[in-house]
Amino acid sequence: MSNKSSVAQMQREPSASRWAKTPFYFNSAEHLLRIERERANTLGELLGAIKTCTDASIFQHTFRTLQEHHFIQEGYSNDFAHWAFFACNENGLAERLSGVDVREFTSIQALRQRLIEILEEYLGQHPIVKDRRALEPFYFCASSSVVVPTAFVARNMAEFAEALERISMHCVHYHFIEARLRLKLNSNDFSMWLEEQMGLKRTAELINRIDIYTSTLQGVRNRIVRIVETALA
Amino acid sequence: MEPQNREQTTALSEEGSNGSDGKRNQPSSVLAPVEAPPRDRRKKPRIRETPPAPPPPPRLDGYEPLIGKAELDELRFLAQGLRGKTVKMVNSTAVGGGVAEILNRLVPLLSELEVATHWDVITGGNDFFEVTKAFHNALHGGAYQLTNDAREIFLLHNEQNRARMRFDEDVIILHDPQPAALIRSKTANHQRWIWRCHIDLSNPNPEVWGFLRPLVEQHDAAIFSSQAFARQLSIPQYLFYPCIDPLSEKNKQLDASFIQQVCDDFGIDRSRPILTQISRFDRLKDPLGVIQAYQLAKKYVDCQLVLAGGSATDDPEGTVVLAEVMEAAGDDPDIIVLNLPPWSGLEINALQSASTIIIQKSLKEGFGLTVTEALWKGKPTIGSAVGGIPNQVIHKLTGALVHSVEGCAYQIRYLLTHPEFAEQLGKNGREHVKENFLITSNVKRWLLLFQIMMGIARQ
């Protein structure tokens, strides 16, 4: 026990008890689904629609998939991958599409381009499947997002840790996953605040490295809380 | 009304109706079929013969234990921006039917959030409702010859309602085709009109849709229950999943003793696995396919099948289908067929709660709220890949999707012999409903839509 405490002491960063100049205001985002005009009956049509659909559609079928199914830790991580497997029976394509980590992208345009590259490459290698009819169409939807402030505000680490345990999953998604589109950085709101306001660079890095694809969002929240509590200890 | 049941040949045995903790419902003995129990185990019907008085609508705070304070706070924040705004909902019936059921819950909740919401019901004679019923069937793809008389009757009754109603609210929502021509009261001001379509328009009769479409496109937006049900329109379209109320009789948490009592009364043996399909006796729900799947599965695993459906007294085809079901069930004492009246929410809830697996093997389906109810109760659910079921049952994640009798039989066997996997499906299914298909999610969608339509939202 004493060994563990000393390790924690060594890992503890010196600024954990400071007060932030700028508090962390916890927000959430709520999303309303629009049904878009595009729909695809083949993988060729899917490729064409991904090229022309709105950014809000790409966001819905990638970032938002994670939020809508935040309680699942297996399965395909975006709607395109799910459809490629279940409606088109193209497991190889589904795996490649599912391998796209939304956290590597700070713009929808870059994410869209990656999806296009994967589809073009796959259909180039397997031209026979391009026009084969899927079991069911892919209906493009889009997300209209509304930012919702919450009552939670953190001015120090204790308040931050307490709020993290009480905010909604939508709030976690907003700050931890959607944030990079806003920040245009490979980071998230929690890590940015911990580094800039609390001077906790290492804690910020640890949080930013959490794998969102091998856990539920509740699991991700638990890991964030543990890291913050370690810094606070 | 007395539930249907098999002929009694032996006295009721109470041996099978033991324990109220549900633990005996675990499929521990499913690998080897056991000796058939007594032919009829039912003690007495417990169904009320007249409808009970409706319970008062729940208050918002009642949902906090289910969805959490943070979620409720988000609803309250969204509503704050709408204070002082007014909303009107218009449909064609105050009682009976899914739309009235939703509005009976939705309107009080919006009002509690201080979004003043009025609910008006249009009136009409038999001729009007005969026309709108024909429209309804035609929009589902049925054959229909649209006559000038039908057009005139539809428009005349809408005009009469328009003359008697006022439309002073900020947002007017017209539900389904019946009141669609009230849109003629729309004026060029700040007011927003929304058409909420609860029916599947994926394959409408072209004449009827051709008649209604110009009315629909005068609205500012349309709402559908599934992506697949929508049409290409010139106005924005939104997706609002149908929803269940977790505090309603059909979905609230029941006492274990009540569940046990219902099973005892219906002769359901809780010591052995229970497969259940809840749906009216309709060929599109494929009750005969469910019996076949049960019979195939029962070669390998011991189980009982409960088929519980709505009253068939006013539906000639329902009576025929019920007779077919009884014939297919033959003298198998483990097939329990229950023809229940519409006010059997508590009993349906108990049957679902007692089930080991819930099946919805429809050949065609709307959204399939019985699936939502099953998932909410954390039950491993097998559903056909039709209508709105794939929105709810994600194969191997929130349930099992099937396309045939054989597929259904295999999934029954698999889930009964892999209880840990089945339990995980049930947990995921409940979370899926919590996130997407509860009335609180529905309230949130309305608040978001009002904010977006009125330009209030911070996007």
Image: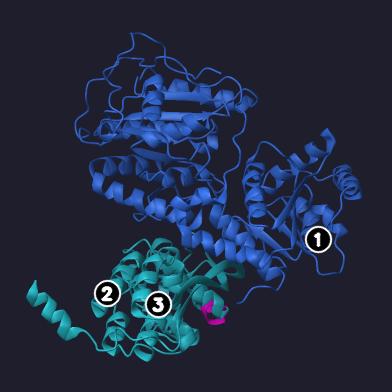
Chain colours: A cyan, B blue
Task: Count neighbours of disc 1 (C-alpha within 10 A) and say few if under 14, some if 14 to 19, many if 20 or more.
Answer: few
B149 on left or right of A177: right
Q: Secondary structure at mark 1?
A: helix
| 2 vs 1, front mark | 2
Q: Secondary structure at mark 2?
A: helix
Looking at this view, is A19 or B108 the one in front?
A: A19
| 3 vs 1, front mark | 3
Task: Name the amino acid type tagged 3.
Answer: Phe
- Number of marks drawn: 3
Task: Name the amino acid type tagged 2.
Answer: Glu
Alpha carbon distance from label 2 to label 1: 60 Å
Have a look at marks 2 and 1 and say if they share a chain.
no
Looking at this view, is B423 or B191 the one in front?
A: B191
Residue at numbered disc 1: B214
Residue B91 pos. (x, y %) = 74, 46
Residue B99 within the segment the image draws in magenta: no
Residue at numbered disc 3: A176
Residue B416 pos. (x, y %) = 27, 40
Badge 3 or badge 2: first in the primary sequence: 3
Residue at numbered disc 2: A229
A77 on left or right of B101: left
Span of residues in magenta: A48-53
Residue at x 72%, y 39% (from the top left corner): B94
Residue B389 pos. (x, y %) = 48, 50
Q: Is residue A176 at least partly visible in the picture?
A: yes
Residue at x 37%, y 78% (from the top left corner): A100
Alpha carbon distance from label 3 to label 2: 17 Å
Residue A52 within the segment the image draws in magenta: yes
Quadrant in which residue A198 is drawn: bottom left
For the C terminus of chain A, which image quadrant?
bottom left
Circle 2/circle 1 CB separation < 8 Å: no
For the N terminus of chain A, which image quadrant?
bottom left
